[in-house]
Image (cartoon, rainbow, N blue to C red):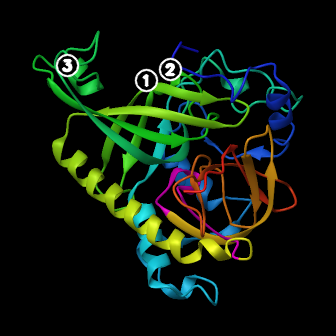
Amino acid sequence: MGNSTTKCIDDHNSKACKEISAYFTGTHEVQECLEGQGEADLHTRMANCKKNPGHKNFVPVNQLSLKHFPSGYHDNDVYDLTKAMADITVRIAVKLTSPDRPEFVPGTKDPYPCYNTRGQNSLRTGTGRVVGVDKYTEGMLWGYRTCPCPECDHSDTPSKVWWKVRVVTATHVVFDDSEARQSSCRLWFDDDQSPVVNIYGWKVNVSHTEGDVCWLDCVTHDVDVVGKLEEMMGRFDGLCGKVRDKYKRRRGVVKLIIIVSHPHGCSKQVSVGHWVDRQEVGGYRWTRYTYTTCTCPGSSGAMVYRLGWGWSQHPHSGGYSGGLNYSGVLLDLDL
């Protein structure tokens, strides 16, 4: 990986990393397609899903209402927050598997996702969420005079104004810079009639292989897209703080988990459940969660929203054969 990539929460060989890795013994939930297959194959995978046949516990985001939340949580603020979370949720598509993927999850003998397809051009999908936007102009960033997106790379008049859009996902979805450059994030994919709006992967800023958390930097020069994203992030931040303050004192009892994801790489779905276990790993409030909230292949990297907490939300990582799912490892900040 490049110098911008952090391999681990601490040192790669530290006790903390080994402790973190030991928890990842389930099945990661990136959606892989057969080599040469694309979007059409994703719909086939959705129809033939073995984990959640019929997807009864998923709600299309455009059909979400208060009745889809458990009794006691028919709260307009929670509903509005879920819709705002959906607005900043993206479908990630990656068209290359890095030759540098490890054979095993570090510290274990569990196979690392997509190791068998390393070096191949095959589609896989996951989920992420937008967490930040930064503007660049000519001369601001060393080595980049114009927008580095694929459109500008092939243009005689590349844009001299562009934006970096940071997306949080799971490391096994986008492993390193080579995969980042062959990735895209589809915005506002709420149903099959949604217009295709993409931002393009650029580089991996931070990657915790053991904790399965990745910060993917994407680029766009579309000012309208950026304006819409900034408005949506502002709305999410405001609601996140409001709902946190409302439920913070009860979060030891209130264990609601909400996930917005793109199962099988298809349109956005909402699932609701509760967390079962909170495990502290690696010290200093590094935690991961197990939960009943439904997920599928393609849900990897989705925000695991815990009611009563603030902006520190873990990405989804995988599932166990017994039915529980688990998150990546992140700091449990009291925000």
Q: Name the residue: 72% across, 46% down.
A: 285
- Residue 57 in sight in this render: no
Q: Are marks 1 and 3 in contact (CB under 8 Å)?
A: no
Q: Of tags 1 and 3, which is closer to the observer?
A: 3
- Taking depth in this image into account, of 141 and 33 the one nearest to the observer is 141
Residue type highlighted by circle 3: Thr
Looking at the rendered structure, the kind of residue marked 1 is: Arg
Which span is picked out in magenta?
254-268
Q: Earlier in the sequence, mark 1 or mark 3?
A: 3
The correct choice, above or below, for 54 with respect to 322 in the image is: below
Q: Is residue 43 visible?
A: yes
Location of the C terminus (image quadrant) = bottom right
* In-image side of 37 versus 196 (left or right): right
Q: Is residue 236 above or below residue 166?
A: below
Instruction: Give the residue pinned by disc 1.
Output: 181
Q: Say few, some or many: other residues with alpha carbon within 10 Å of mark 1 (under 14 / 14 to 19 / 20 or more).
A: many
Where does the N terminus fall, quadrant-wise?
top right
Q: Could you tell me residue 55's position as x and y percent?
A: 64, 69
- In the image, which disc is placed on residue 65? none
Name which residue type carries label 2: Asp
Label 1 to label 3: alpha-carbon separation: 16 Å
Give x and y (percent) for residue 258.
Answer: 59, 67
Q: In which quarter of the image is residue 44?
A: bottom right
Secondary structure beneath dot 1 equals: loop
**Residue under pointer 3:** 146
Classify 10 Å Cα crowding around label 2: few (below 14), some (14-19), many (20 and above): many
Q: Residue 177 carries which label?
A: 2
Q: Is residue 264 magenta?
A: yes
